[in-house]
Image (cartoon, rainbow, N blue to C red):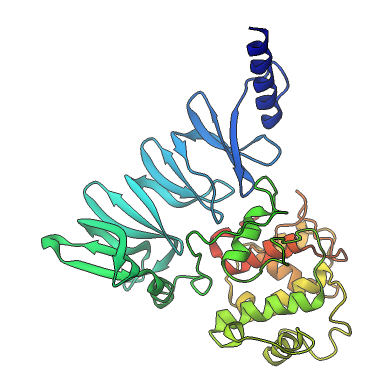
Amino acid sequence: MKRKKRLAALTLALCLALTGLAPGAVAVTVYGYQEGFAQAVENGKWGFAGGDGSVAIPLQYDSVVSFSLGMAAVNLNGRLGVIRPDGAYLIPPEYDTLMPAGFGLYIAQKGNRWGVVSVLPYLNEEGKKTNEVYPITYENVELGTSGGLDALILTAGGGSRTIVPLFRLPGILQSLGVEGSQFPLTRGRLPAFTDVRGRDWYSMWVDIAYNTGIMSGTGNNAFEPNREVTVAEALQMAANMDSRFKGDTFHTTAHVSTPWYIEAVDYCLASGTITAGQFDDYERQITRRELAQVFGATSLARSLPDRNSLVRVMAAVGDVSGRDEGAQAIYGLYVKGILTGVDANLSFRPGDLVTRAEAAALAARLARPEQRMDLF
């Protein structure tokens, strides 16, 4: 009996440690972490706890699914939707069924009709914003195989079927004008780095940067999130993103030059991402200001719409002056929702060096529109 009581006490202590609650406080049960969040429940209502164990997304749902690639399905009053890490809806909770199909797409059911919806809206032929890639009019939609290929199988009235191989979906999204379709999210393609834990704030950004092919590990199943980024590594990422956005061949070509980064340097010079003499040493570490200048000069960054007021950004970011070198690039990334600052005051710390984890966060927001932030 004493052993059982001791085990019960240890279990309670573990629960309190996970939730960060003092003894006597109301306990929120927290389950395993993934991408910086853990499923959390109290009195039958679910939400998410952040890395410090406190509630980060309110406990208001009937059920939730763990975050994956920066998205989580939730059940609100019997209807399913998809949220991002700040709790904002990417897909509103109005569906009876939502099943991930990859590439930011979900098989969706309303009543007895099915279709396919995207976490990112686009303008249809009538100029109206919609997230229905295939309208909710089908008798059934499912994942299956056709000719040995994974495919969407859409069944219409009378049993007629439309078969769409999954590998064609990124091209279909691009033809529809869905933003970010040059950087598709591949279902199930998650890294297993031994030095990135599910509770780490950067684990989601590492997952997205890896999944979209912008960054990879450093060998031996490691990512080295706290290692500082060199100029050469930053230019390699910038060339990769710029090339994929424009649809040219740099990102699909094997590079075996010596030194390894010279082709990325040449690409960035030719594309105008950097200018001759901008860097005198490509193997040194890069500062946050310099990284903002490099990323901000890519075709991808220049194409992005504004979502935050420049006037408010300039007033809020207290450690950057409009007269500073690189100020316009820094402000521009805040305005576009890429930079969010290192604290509640939106501070930038322009002279600090950049870790691989921080670079992953910037690259992920550049690539994936659903992760860009409204600051005000």
Query: How many numbered circles are shown?
Result: 0
Which residue is at a point 62% across and 68% down the rendered structure image? Answer: 366
Q: Position of residue 142 (x, y in %)?
A: 29, 57
- Vertical relation: 81 (above or below) 185: above
Q: Is residue 182 left or right of residue 108?
A: right
Which residue is at a point 73% across and 22% down the rendered structure image? Answer: 22
Image quadrant where residue 216 sits: bottom right
Q: Position of residue 221 (x, y in %)?
A: 69, 61
Considering every residue shown, the one lying at the far top of the view is 1
Which residue is at a point 72% across and 65% down the rendered structure image? Answer: 359
Q: Position of residue 149 (x, y in %)?
A: 34, 70
Image quadrant where residue 77 sits: top left
Judge by depth and name the residue closer to the eye, 311 or 285.
285
Judge by depth and name the residue closer to the eye, 102 or 70.
102
Judge by depth and name the residue closer to the eye, 128 or 22.
22
Q: Is residue 280 left or right of residue 354?
A: right
- Vertical relation: 171 (above or below) 103: below
Q: Is residue 376 visible?
A: no
Which residue is at a point 53% across and 71% down the rendered structure image? Answer: 183
Q: Position of residue 73 (x, y in %)?
A: 46, 47
Image quadrant where one finds the N terminus? top right
Q: Is residue 48 left or right of residue 81?
A: right
Q: Is residue 67 visible?
A: yes
Q: Is residue 57 left or right of residue 216?
A: left
